[in-house]
Amino acid sequence: MKRPEPVQAVKQRRDAALRALVDGVPYIQYLGVRIDRRGDELTAILPFADKLIGNPMLPALHGGVTAAFLEVTAVITLSWSYLWDDIESGALDFEVADSPSLPRLPKTVDFSVDYLRSGLPRDAYARARINRSGRRYASVHVEGWQDNRDRLFAQGTGHFVMPQRR
């Protein structure tokens, strides 16, 4: 019987895979979005920065930033979900020198956002729930909040074309 991998090796592999997904998209870097991972659950964090303000009179987060933040959360969560088995098995290991190139990300078909209240000048958080994910198509719902998880400032629903498995 094969011994299980040390927990630290599994954590490092998961963290490297998530880092590769996030670092592979320049716009995620520009926004400053970070992803917090607890097991297989992801929470996206949009740290506040002055460049994210759309209306300085309120001040409020720009609607495009809010939409992009929710969409990025959906894409990364969807990618994480469909790559999970390959990451866990070690088939995708981003820490070795001959690691595979970044897997293709799902492509957005449409994404709609409900702006429920103004995004305040502070950190924002988001989590995505995959409603359906098949070989070709996926549907994802995302919720964004700031200070209180029960008081959403925006939510979105997106449909995506899934990348073909290699």
Image (spheres, helix red, strand yellow):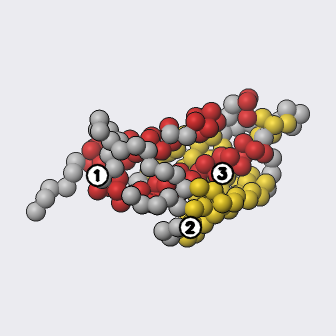
Question: In the picture provided, is 16 more to the left or to the right than 52?
Answer: left
| Residue at x-position 60% and y-position 61% | 160
| Residue at x-position 34% and y-position 56% | 86
Foreground of the two, 64 or 153: 64
* Secondary structure of the residue carrying numbered label 3: helix
Q: CA distance from mark 1 to mark 3?
A: 29 Å
User: Which quadrant does the N terminus fall into?
Assistant: bottom left
Question: In the picture provided, is 131 more to the left or to the right than 56?
Answer: left
Whichever of labels 2 and 1 marks the residue nearer the N terminus, that label is: 1
At label 1, the amino acid type is Gly
Give the number of the mark in front: 2 or 1. Answer: 2
Give the tally of numbered discs: 3
| Residue at x-position 28% and y-position 44% | 8
The percent position of residue 85, horizontal first and vertical second, equals 36, 60
From the image, tell me which residue sits under label 2.
137
* Secondary structure of the residue carrying numbered label 2: strand
Q: Residue furthest left?
A: 1
From the image, tell me which residue sits under label 1.
90
Check the image and report above or below for 121 versus 150. Answer: above
Q: Which mark is residue 70?
A: 3
The percent position of residue 133, horizontal first and vertical second, equals 52, 68
Q: CA distance from mark 2 to mark 1?
A: 25 Å
Question: In the picture provided, is 22 more to the left or to the right than 52?
Answer: left
Give the number of the mark in front: 3 or 2. Answer: 2
Q: Residues within 10 Å of mark 1 (few under 14, many from 20)?
A: few
Q: Residue furthest right?
A: 57
At label 3, the amino acid type is Leu
Q: CA distance from mark 3 to mark 2?
A: 18 Å
Q: Dividing the picture into quarters, in which one does residue 83 lie?
A: bottom left
